[in-house]
Image (cartoon, rainbow, N blue to C red):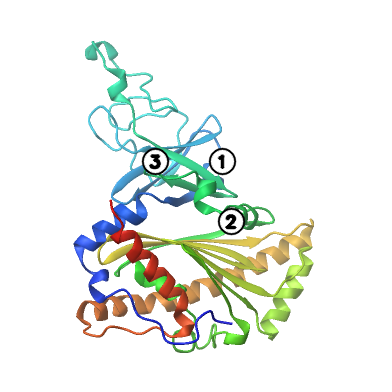
Amino acid sequence: MFVHQSRLEYLLQPYHYVDAQHYQREVERLFLPAWHLVGTCGKLAQPGDFVTLELLDRPVLLRNIDGEIHAFLNVCAHRHCLLTHRPHGHDPTFRCQYHGWEYTKEGRTARIPDASCFRPFDRENARLEKFRVGTAGDLVFVALGDDAPSLEEYLGEYDAICRDAFAPPYRLARAWQYELSCNWKVPIENTLEAYHIPSVHPKTLKEHPSEENSEHTLGDACTTLTTPEPPSLARAMQNFLIRRLGLTPTNVYIHHHIHPNLVIIRMDVMRLVQVYIPTSPTTCRFQVLLYTPRGRSRGPLRFLVSRLLKRLVTWVARRIIEEDRGIFADQQRGLQSSVHPGALGTLEERLYVFHKWVLEQCDRPA
């Protein structure tokens, strides 16, 4: 059942999706105090493995050093060059690509070629800027701000969910990244409501769940949808495959949104995590990690079943993502020209909670 039984006020106005000043306030109030999903432990499994990314206009470097994951501003203290421009890779030595300055896991300078040229040397002011790192299951998070709580405190009840959902028997199957021509809130609002399903997903998802089969949990900074998967031939097939992997089907779809930009979807056949990183008032980066089960049993049958399930789930998930992507630019274009206040039905009540939270955070004292 829905929590609200009547139409809700549309709190955000079109300028909240295009205004540069409001965008900057969102970055400062919503994103800098937050933890951000930036990668997976599997991509940083061995000492020397590294990953780079852009996060809120900051180049970030994640690196496995002596078996621990560390995060740094990807800028050398010598002449301000990126330590590396490669998106990922392996290098046993932590050094800058330009002049070979080497660093420790604390970000201090280690070996410096021709170090005598720099005497007297101020090592304290030549340290790399470090960011805090945390993990939950296979997921790696980074906090850019010093005033953010611990990752466990930030995720709250979802910390245990992440540690369980993104861990064996589920393993990373695919990862996608898209640059979207829309404000970051546009795709989040899309994933928070099922009202668009008959129009946008007529063949893949077909119908949205009824109110009788929808349980909305509305928190101060998070919301959840729980609904049973409807009986179908596809569900019967997925249950057969799940059992062959030694797992027990639940036939439940659970969708979590942790404000501002972390979405987690749990089903028997997959675990999906989505993040939406703002890159400008009218653009954002959309990242998706898809996990599928490998099963608890062993043998050739388990291998074949897990491979088949991975292919099927990946194909369906990719198709649904592409269907949604097709509407985002039009939504943004409409926002830039709209003269309407907007309206929210009870199906869209999770948007109301999100809108309310955005405005409360942006209007609070700095």
Neighbours of disc 1 within 10 Å: few (<14), some (14-19), many (20+)? some
Compute the Cα span from label 2 to label 3: 28 Å
Estimate the x, y position of residue 63 in percent, counting from the top left.
46, 37
**Sequence-wise first label, 1 or 3:** 1
| Element on which disc 3 rests | strand
Estimate the x, y position of residue 9 in percent, counting from the top left.
36, 81
- Asked if disc 2 and disc 3 are in contact, CB closer than 8 Å, the reply is no
What residue appears at the point 60 percent right and 70 percent down from the top-left corner?
Answer: 254
**Image position of 153 with respect to 343: above or below:** above
Q: Which residue is mark 3?
A: 61
Q: Which residue is mark 2?
A: 157
Give the number of marks: 3
- Asked if disc 1 and disc 3 are in contact, CB closer than 8 Å, the reply is no
What residue appears at the point 48 percent right and 48 percent down from the top-left corner?
Answer: 141
**Sequence-wise first label, 2 or 3:** 3
Q: Nearer the viewer, residue 28 or 265?
A: 28
The dot on residue 45 is 1
| Element on which disc 2 rests | helix
Quarter of the picture containing the N terminus is bottom right
The residue at the far front in this view is 365
**Sequence-wise first label, 1 or 2:** 1
